[in-house]
Image (cartoon, rainbow, N blue to C red):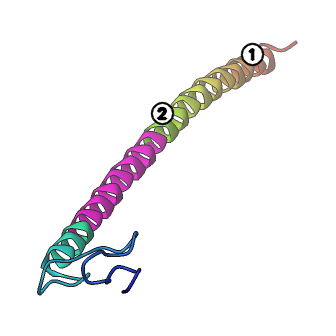
């Protein structure tokens, strides 16, 4: 008699037994792969959208900050030019008075 059991009755350890008519890449596996691909595509699209919004927000924040700094610098420059112009104007009046009145 045969001391080894027949493979058809006792499957080997580690081997998957599929029901009759189904193979490893059966309909369930195809659906799972399809769903996985759809979920992966949706996650990638969502990640791209989040990154695009973050990029847009960062660019907008930097642009706002640059305009605020430029505006502050322009105001300081205008104030300094006004002071210098006032000083030059005052010096011109002093020189005119000195020339016309004689020194």
Residue 102 vs residue 45: left or right? Answer: right
State whether residue 2 is above or below residue 103: below
Q: Position of residue 32 (x, y in %)?
A: 20, 69
Which residue is painted at 30% across and 73% down in the image? 16
Q: How many marks?
A: 2
State whether residue 29 is above or below residue 66: below
Residue 58 vs residue 103: left or right? Answer: left
On-image quarter of the N terminus: bottom left
Q: What distance separates the C-alpha of mark 1 from that of mark 2?
A: 39 Å
Tell me the residue that label 2 is attached to.
68
Whether residue 57 appears in magenta in the rendering, the answer is yes
Region of the chain picked out in magenta, as a range: 38-63
Residue 40 vs residue 3: left or right? Answer: left
Q: Position of residue 67 (x, y in %)?
A: 47, 39
Residue 95 vs residue 38: left or right? Answer: right
Crowding at mark 1 (Cα within 10 Å: few <14, some 14-19, many 20+): few
Which residue is painted at 48% across and 42% down in the image? 62
Tell me the residue that label 1 is attached to.
94
Q: Residue furthest front?
A: 1
């Amino acid at each position: 008699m045969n001391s080894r059991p027949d493979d058809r009755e006792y499957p080997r350890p580690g081997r998957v037994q599929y029901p009759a008519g189904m193979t490893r890449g059966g309909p369930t596996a195809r659906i799972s792969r399809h769903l996985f691909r759809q979920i992966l595509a949706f996650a990638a699209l969502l990640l791209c959208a989040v990154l695009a919004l973050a990029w847009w927000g960062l660019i907008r924040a930097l642009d706002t900050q640059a305009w605020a700094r430029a505006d502050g610098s322009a105001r300081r420059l205008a104030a300094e030019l006004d002071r210098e112009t006032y000083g030059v104007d005052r010096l011109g009046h002093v020189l005119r008075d000195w020339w016309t009145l004689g020194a």
